[in-house]
Amino acid sequence: SISKKKKRSGHPSPPISFPAIPIKFSEKQQASHYLYVRAHGVRQGTKSTWPQKRTLFVLNVPPYCTERSWLTVTSASQVQAILLPQPPEHAEAPPASDICLSLQGFQVAYVVFQKPSGVSAALALKGPLLVSTESHPVKSGIHKWISDYADSIPDPEALRVEVDTFMEAYDQKIAEEEAKAKEEEGVPDKEGWVKVTRRGRRPVLPRTEAASLRVLERERRKRARKELLNFYAWQHRESKMEHLAQLRKKFEEDKQRIELLRAQRKFRPY
Amino acid sequence: MMGPAPAGEQLCGAIGEPEVMEPALEGTGKEGKKASSRKRTLAEPPAKGLLQPVKLSRAELYKEPTNEELNHLRETEILFHSSLLRLQVEELLKEVRLSEKKKDRIDAFLREVNQRVVRVPSVPETEEILQDKDGLNQRYFRKRALYLAHLAHHLAQDPLFGSVCFSYTNGCHLKPSLLLRPRGKDERLVTVRLHPCPPPDFFRPCRLLPTKNNVRSAWYRGQSPAGDGSPEPPTPHYNTWVLQDTALESHLQLLSTMLGSAQGLKDGVALLKVWLRQRELDKGQGGFTGFLVSMLVVFLVSTHKIHTTMSGYQVLRSVLQFLATTDLTVNGISLCLSSDPSLPALADFHQAFSVVFLDSSGRLNLCADVTASTYHQGWSLLWLQVQYEARLSMTLLDSRADDGFQLLLMTPKPMIRAFDHVLHLHPLSRLQAACHRLKLWPELQDNGGDYVSAALGPLTTLLEQGLGTRLKLLAHSRPPVPEWGISQDPPKHKDSGSLTLGLLLRPEGLTSVLELGPEADQPEAAKFRQFWGFRSELRRFQDGAIREAVVWEAASMSQKRLIPHQVVTHLLALHTDIPETCVHYVGGPLDALIQGLKQTSSTGEEALAVAVCCYDDLSRLLWGLEGLPLTVSAVQGAHPVLRYTEVFPPTPVRPASSFYEPLQERSSLLPRLDKPCPAYVEPMTVVCHLEGSGQWPQDAEAVQRVRAAFQLRLAELLTQQHGLQCRATATHTDVLKDGFVFRIRVAYQREPQILKEVQSPEGMISLRDTPASLRLERDTRQLPLLTSALHGLQQQHPAFSGVARLAKRWVRAQLLGEDFTDESLDLVAAALFLHPEPFTPPSSPQVGFLRFLYLVSTFDWKNNPLIVNLNNELTVEEQVEIRSGFLAARTQLPVMVIVTPQDRKHSVWTQDGPSAQILQQLVVLAAEALPMLEKQLMDPQGPGDIRTVFRPPLDIYDVLIRLSPRHIPRHRQAVDSPAASFCRGLLSQPGPSSLMPVLGYDPPQLYLMQLREAFGDLALFFYDQHGGEVIGVLWKPTSFQPQPFKASSTKGRMVMSRGGELVMVPNVEAILEDFAVLGEGLVQTVEARSERWTV
């Protein structure tokens, strides 16, 4: 089943369809990483967010690359790049916390060019590409952390505006829902059923699992209270047997425990 | 060694496979392999050997019992606590019992020895050697020694023996015995001790009563008994030693007739010997020996307190019960049944000895040696210790704890781990002078000149009196006198190493710096002055009384803990002439590891209290805040500082503005590129619950916005009403108060529930845990609860803070801090206080830390949850339930499971780590550190470099990344604190700037986050957050296996041709350069230390 899945994923395994382009941070580095690139294409009929023929799909993008870096490395003007932490088949929604966004590992990229020729030009790149150049330096290390810190200082005004806008929309939505509920209150539907809601004139308890469990538990206890224990001879016999079974189970557990300790020579006192 | 297994298989395996790691106690002789084995443990999954939930079929469980089974069950219930205990005891006895095969070999050797001793030429009959008055003036002992030397001379030439040497019988230097060991492979099997004995009736018993003198002053001191006609002093110990020889044979006969036929009694004695040895009570001169305890069993049998049909466990229990409840220093006991009026009374013995237990002759006190010399003292250190231990053990047995067996019989209690402080007296020759100073001539005469034994009693009485309420128990330990060759001189008293005393402290006594004496005009005042010497001074107290008093210098808690040191050195110098240089007090050498930079006089408890006090103020402000739409319903601390477990307590921040880039419009300071990294300030989290109300929306997104609005409002109000500098975000509000920064998180009690709600298609709302709801519950509910519980623990046990911080510091210093949450380590430390058995809760950081290492290195995490019963909320039944639930769910639980009353199933604080390998690494490191540190602390010459065990091994890493101290904000906290570091932009006095300081900015941590994000699946990264200058990198071997090309696994890899096939391997050269690129400015060098990637 695994091989089937692979086929469906749309990324054929032979690397031959992914030309490798060496990439380095700057002139100073000796060794390069390799970008594995391919024109982005999807099978007929499937929808894609990325424009056909103008998009380059890139694997193994080093951590210091930013979305801006693509302007630097491909000399083409007018590109737009989107970086994703993982290839699309794994792309669950990334947790939306601000820490994750500021972090980078190796990523994949979809680079959208102005014209299809941009893709072929990029596929022909020999490299090594440089991410940080004198004209377009990329911040790393201390530089980056200090500027990240400065960016992380929140602007209370912006926060206030965001909260107010959201709450306004939210309040409106709630008001609408309430109005609708009020309208429907007591009005039977086509089959004559009347919907009872929390907000109505005579509100009911919300239907929750916890509430129904509570009811069941209460019932059970009520029944248990009425039952007679050790009243009939068979009950007595059974409870004795139950006790014996417990002892046997405990004994087996203990034996196992001892066996383990003996194997570890844990009974040598010193 | 097993090969690596896929992660899923690490926790399930066959039962009974041996552990990879040998038990810590056996780890000798393998030093050469240590480094490699350590490396292996990190790379490989831990050994198997996991308990499985028992699965018995219904038929097996409910089959009709046989008679035999019923009998066994009944017997177990009557004779033992439980079937587990019965099995455990049986296993232990199997280990300590002599096998039949060995017994035969030993018997054969004994027969050989017997033949040879008889054949030694020209051995005169003992009657011919001994003469009438040989009981006097050590004549008997000297002849005995000569006789033995003669035997030794002949036996040494016999090829049967592998070694022939001397040792002292029970450490008594007047009584050597000859040790014979067979030649060849049995040399370690058996040692035969030859004790020469006089004929049974040779000495007249009446001459050897405890009141008699048999060492004449004229002979011993070379001076005639003082002309004033004062009587010769009695020599009770000397007399006992003679009597012991005459009674030896009859004692052996008694033991074999009374115990020989009853298996339960023999088992009981074996268990008791193990019990004594684990507590080191039988050790050294005058120990509570196995012989003594066997005689005690005989006594209890003869008084019908023990029956011959009892099981070994019942015998153990009965003897402990007897020891715990009977005080032999007041009411001595006797095996003698005769009512002969000529026999001495028990009272006579009580006069001479502190502990009295007479043998069947009624003339010999079996416990005479239990205290060395207590001629005029009415107490015995060892007896107190035996009684104390017996009481502890009885409490343990009565508590019916599940692991009672383990704690009672399998846990060693070496002095250094049992006592809060220890002190070594070294060199011992100083005690000779002390004896003269204390005028202990009669004792010396009685002890044959053994000045250590003579001085021990008076010395410890002096200390006990001086330590008073600070002391719970005092114990002593003397290393056993070594054996010596027959051509060597016997060891002298001063050669026997040192005298070590252990102090068990009473925490409530440690808070006072005052010894309050009597009022100046009382007659006792003179006595007080005499006792304390020049330290005693007249003081006027608040109630107007003028009293004698001693005041010790101690400002901080750590200094107060060390007042016993001052007391001991002062009293010893004053009364016994033992100078300070000979008293090696070991109480606080580890304190240095948790001391702040400038406050070497404190271990931080005071600084933490200041921060907690500031928090209390803030919480009052929050309660009283006007203008919040909802009222505050609770304010709870949720940070290690607020439970006293932050390794380095925060100090108030006073930023020097020139050091920072001000961001005026947001009232904040920023770090500057051209300056060293500013001081690290970590905000202390405080959770502020707002009341539930209809105003809260019932939608997760909306709740977040309302909370953000509250955060903003809080900041505004705190600034308006109290002038505090604040900064709000959507999730928290940072508040600067008196130089401390608090991070207030507004919480709404129902929010976790809202996050959990899932609506089914039928409209039923059910609750399902989600990662977000769990995180929120942990942060806003469990963390505050834990923080307040541990805060409470600190109030009960003042040493908790020090222990928890030392433990955490050590784990972090081993570069493993990242894998263990603060909370999990705090809980392990708390367990040492809440479940100290078989010890009592630690009263010093030192002993607590040693026990932490012991716990970590011996706890079987695979098969047991660590139950930390905070506030004693869990009942015994609940704990049993937790244990069985644990076994059933083992494979779904984290590697390390810590259970608290608030967290009975999930072990929230260990959910995200450590991994099995990292935990195993910690176990190995702890097992290495413990004996090393204990040896250092027990070294009478001084502990040497105490930081050794805190330095991490670096040889195991594949790559070392060295960091520049300029950008390590906590550089000065390093284990080896640098002589100089960089200015971190702080003023010593409050400056004009009131902008928000730089918060949580720590370049090494930011760098590590980036490294883990980028290379986490190729390598592990290790770092000490307290000023570490190096990051250790370990490649993951599984990630270095060549892999086929796959879009999802290209990260940092490159395509290579391997045997005609294209595979992906990590691009190590480029990755090493990435390490430098990502940490530009911070990284000094990247050192690749192995070539492991070229597999």
Image (cartoon, rainbow, N blue to C red):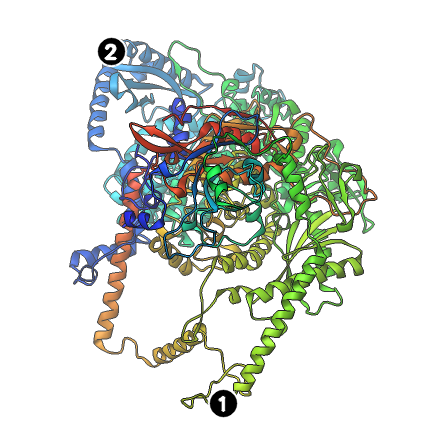
Closest to the camera, between mark 1 and mark 2, is 1
Point 66% across, 25% down: residue: B580
- The crowd level at tag 2 (other Cα within 10 Å; few <14, some 14-19, many 20+) is few
State the residue position of label 2.
Answer: B159
Quadrant housing residue A181: bottom right
Residue in the foreground of this view, choosing between B117 and B463:
B463
The amino acid marked with disc number 1 is Val
Which element carries disc 2, helix, strand or loop?
loop
Position of residue B584 measured from the top left corner of the image (x, y, whole percent): 60, 26
Which element carries disc 1, helix, strand or loop?
loop
B681 over B187 or under it: above or below: below
Q: Is residue B993 left or right of residue B861?
A: right
Q: Is residue B444 visible?
A: yes
Chain of the residue that carries numbered disc 1 in the rendered image: A
Residue in the foreground of this view, choosing between B447 and B992:
B992
The amino acid marked with disc number 2 is Pro
- The crowd level at tag 1 (other Cα within 10 Å; few <14, some 14-19, many 20+) is few
State the residue position of label 1.
Answer: A187
Q: Is residue B90 visible?
A: no
Position of residue B609 measured from the top left corner of the image (x, y, whole percent): 69, 48
Position of residue B181 measured from the top left corner of the image (x, y, whole percent): 29, 19
Badges 1 and 2, same chain: no
Point 57% across, 59% down: residue: B780
Residue in the foreground of this view, choosing between B628 and B489:
B628
Labels 1 & 2 near each other (Cβ < 8 A): no
Position of residue B603 measured from the top left corner of the image (x, y, whole percent): 65, 38
Point 32% across, 33% down: residue: B251
A14 over B136 or under it: above or below: below
Q: Is residue B565 left or right of residue B350?
A: right
